[in-house]
């Protein structure tokens, strides 16, 4: 899944913005989203603290939506 943010990749601003966007999309708090890999890379690996069934359903909704967001 792709996420685009306008924040610059300076001082962790872009990473923080990505965490915020993902948290909002999945309906969780920012502290429930963790950056596992990719602090300095455009490609990130995130972990979301969410019930697996709820998370999978939300991901399916996001992927099915034409704009990728709801």
Image: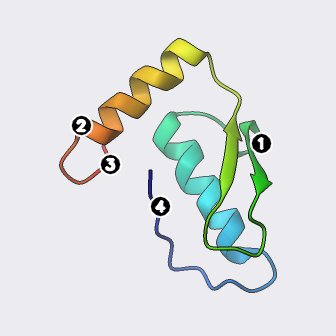
Marks 2 and 1 in Cβ contact (< 8 Å):
no
Alpha carbon of mark 2 to alpha carbon of mark 4: how far? 15 Å
Secondary structure found at label 4: loop
Q: Residue at x 47, y 23 (%)?
A: 56
Q: What residue sits right under mark 2 in the picture?
A: 64
Query: Which of the two discs, 2 and 1, sits closer to the camera?
Result: 2
In primary-sequence order, the first of circles 1 and 3 is 1
Alpha carbon of mark 2 to alpha carbon of mark 1: how far? 26 Å
Q: What residue sits right under mark 1 in the picture?
A: 31
In primary-sequence order, the first of circles 2 and 1 is 1
Count neighbours of disc 1 (C-alpha within 10 A) and say few if under 14, some if 14 to 19, many if 20 or more.
Answer: few
Residue 16 image offset from top left, x and y in percent? 70, 64
Residue 62 image offset from top left, x and y in percent? 34, 39
Secondary structure found at label 3: loop
Query: Which of the two discs, 3 and 4, sits closer to the camera?
Result: 4
Alpha carbon of mark 3 to alpha carbon of mark 4: how far? 10 Å
Q: Is residue 7 above or below residue 67?
A: below
In primary-sequence order, the first of circles 3 and 4 is 4
In primary-sequence order, the first of circles 2 and 3 is 2
What's the mark number on residue 69?
Answer: 3
In primary-sequence order, the first of circles 4 and 1 is 4
Pick whichever, 9 or 30, lies toward us.
9
Secondary structure found at label 1: helix
Count neighbours of disc 3 (C-alpha within 10 A) and say few if under 14, some if 14 to 19, many if 20 or more.
Answer: few
Q: What residue sits right under mark 4 in the picture?
A: 3
Alpha carbon of mark 4 to alpha carbon of mark 1: how far? 18 Å
Secondary structure found at label 2: helix
Marks 2 and 3 in Cβ contact (< 8 Å):
no
């Amino acid at each position: 899944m792709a996420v685009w943010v306008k924040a610059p990749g300076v001082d962790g601003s872009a990473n923080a913005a990505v965490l915020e966007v993902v948290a909002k999309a999945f309906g969780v708090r920012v502290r429930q989203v963790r950056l596992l890999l990719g602090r300095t890379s455009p490609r990130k690996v995130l972990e979301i603290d969410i019930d697996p069934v709820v998370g999978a359903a939300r991901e399916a909704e996001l992927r099915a939506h034409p704009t990728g967001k709801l």
